[in-house]
Image (cartoon, helix red, strand yellow):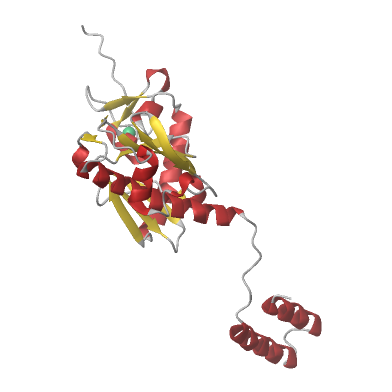
Amino acid sequence: MALFKREYCPLCGKKLGMFGTVRIQDGIGVCMNCYSALDMDFSIAKFQSVMNLNERLVRMIENQKEFRSFSTTREVKVGGMYFREDCRMGRWYVSYEKNPQNPTLYRYDEIADFRLVEDGDTITSGGLGRAVVGGALFGGTGAIVGAVTGGKVSKKIINTLNVVITLKDTCRNSVTVSCLHMGQPCKSGSASYNLSMHNAQTLLDFLNAICARGASLNVQTPVTSPNTPRAVDEILKYKELLDKGIINEQQFEAKKKELLGM
Ligand SMILES: [Zn+2]
């Protein structure tokens, strides 16, 4: 078996070993370092061309710059995954790692849809500009549990309780988060079940807030009403520029209107 062909990673040029090689389109091998840097799902990697991966790599380099100034303003941890948001930057990410190096930062409008799925049945779903239906979020955990059981006490065993998030990302179509308490199946209506539902609630709440912000981004809202005291200060500065002949009357009037939101 001397047919072992020497292979090189098309992204970094490193020689590929027997192990730790990820196969993409046409069976081309990519090294583990490059693959990790792409922050891409395994299931998707095999359909990617070298060009796609290069594009992704460019995004991740930009992402790294952005991530350096990311500062968490909200965090939830569900199913061993960290969901973090920086509301000032308007970005969020999800990672299994507590201190990820370069997780893909998403805009608020990059969630296509999210749903809570219990043993294959969708309990509730939400998305951009669409709050979780059934008022589940607003009534607390009890509301979800009540809605699910319809008041009846059933002792069904729940094997999976997942929140499935569909992303607008060609390299990561979806994220599945297990909400089961301690990752263990439980009986519906049990204490474990209620804790599991509480996990789900926490995540749905986070996602709902993200999507609500995403929706408000997509609405072409006019610039917020002018902050009058600040506007007056600014106008006085421009008046001074006008008086000194640095700007003309027309420019001054235009600036005044802008500042007063006229
Ligand atoms: Zn490589």
What x and y, as percent, mark residue 205? 39, 52
What x and y, as percent, mark residue 52? 47, 32
The residue at 64%/61% (across/down) is 221
Quadrant of the drawing holding the N terminus: top left
Determine whether, in the image, residue 240 is placed left or right of residue 64: right
Determine whether, in the image, residue 131 is placed left or right of residue 151: right
The residue at 37%/21% (across/down) is 28
Quadrant of the drawing holding the C terminus: bottom right
The residue at 35%/41% (across/down) is 151
Above or below, 209 against 39 in this view is below
> Residue 163 or 81: which is nearer the viewer?
163
Count of numbered labels shown in the rendering:
0
The residue at 66%/90% (across/down) is 236
> Residue 217 or 2: which is nearer the viewer?
217
Residue 130 in sight from this viewpoint: yes
What x and y, as percent, mark residue 248? 78, 84
Quadrant of the rendered image containing residue 181: top left
